[in-house]
Amino acid sequence: MHSLHALRQILFQILRFNTKVIDAFPASPAVTLASFRVGVYVAPVYLLQSLFHLLQPGGDQDFVTFAATEVLTYVIGWVLFPVVLLQLAPHLGWGRRVLRYITVYNWFQVAVALALLPFIVLNGLQIIPLEAAQFLMMITATAIMVYSWFIARHTLKVPGLTATGCVVLDLLLSVFINGVLPSLI
């Protein structure tokens, strides 16, 4: 297991598209399971986003229902993609590499949360116009998808098209979890 300082250094190297550091993450169930603690580390960023959403005018949902829905979608958001990957791995010949992918993917969520934080605050406080926030968010989302592709490509050791499939799968599941699932709860 790595220290938080070592993980930060490894994450910075990944953000520099350094493929050599990817092997620093063991492909083991214990390390992969431990990487889910990142969900706790980045939760405050998404809590802030939820609070801004709750405080928007016109919200007609009571706090308990809103909080339960947010917590449930957050947990499902952390679990569904890895579970789907673990189901696909044997059929796609990924073997234990899928464990490394999930681990690196989870740790990458720290960078994602930090990248989204300014937009959450600026948009939540209505400091910049909505159109500007949407434009900047689109650029950030594109960068996140590029890094996600890089991580999938090099941790799973798959062709670019397969890595693209992983990114698209993640995107579709995120749309379902954040867009469709709350209306079903």
Image (tube, helix red, strand yellow):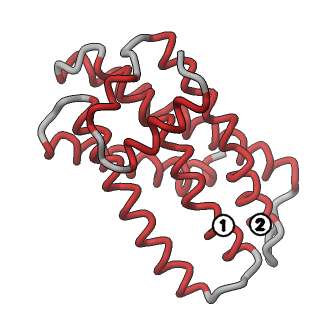
- Which residue type carries mark 2? Phe
Q: Residues within 10 Å of mark 1 (few under 14, many from 20)?
A: many
**Which of the 4 quarters of the picture holds residue 62?**
bottom right
- Residue 165 placed where, x, y %? 23, 44
Give the position of the C terminus as an image quadrant: top right
- What residue is pinned by disc 2? 52
Label 1–label 2 contact, CB within 8 A = yes
| Residue type at numbered disc 1 | Ile
Badge nearest the viewer, 1 or 2: 1
Q: What is the quadrant of residue 53 in the picture? A: bottom right
| Location of residue 171 in the rendering, given as x and y in whole percent from the top left corner | 39, 51
The residue drawn where x is 43% and y is 36% is 105
Q: Which of the 4 image quadrants contains residue 27?
A: top left
Q: Is residue 101 above or below residue 178?
A: above
Dot 2, how many residues are within 10 Å of its Cα: few (below 14), some (14-19), or many (20+)?
A: some
Query: Callout 1: helix, strand or loop?
Result: helix
Residue 158 image point, x, y percent: 16, 33
Residue 131, compared with residue 68, is above or below; it is below
Closer-to-camera residue (4/78) = 4
Please give the name of the residue rendered at 18% of the width and 24% of the height, measured from the top-left corner: 92
Q: Give the residue at x 43% y 25%.
A: 83
**The label number, if any, that marks residue 120 in the structure image:** 1
Tell whether 139 sits left or right of 33: left
Q: Is residue 17 above or below residue 78?
A: below
Secondary structure under the numbered disc 2 in the rendered image: helix
Q: Is residue 122 left or right of residue 17?
A: right
Percent position of residue 2, x then y: 54, 21
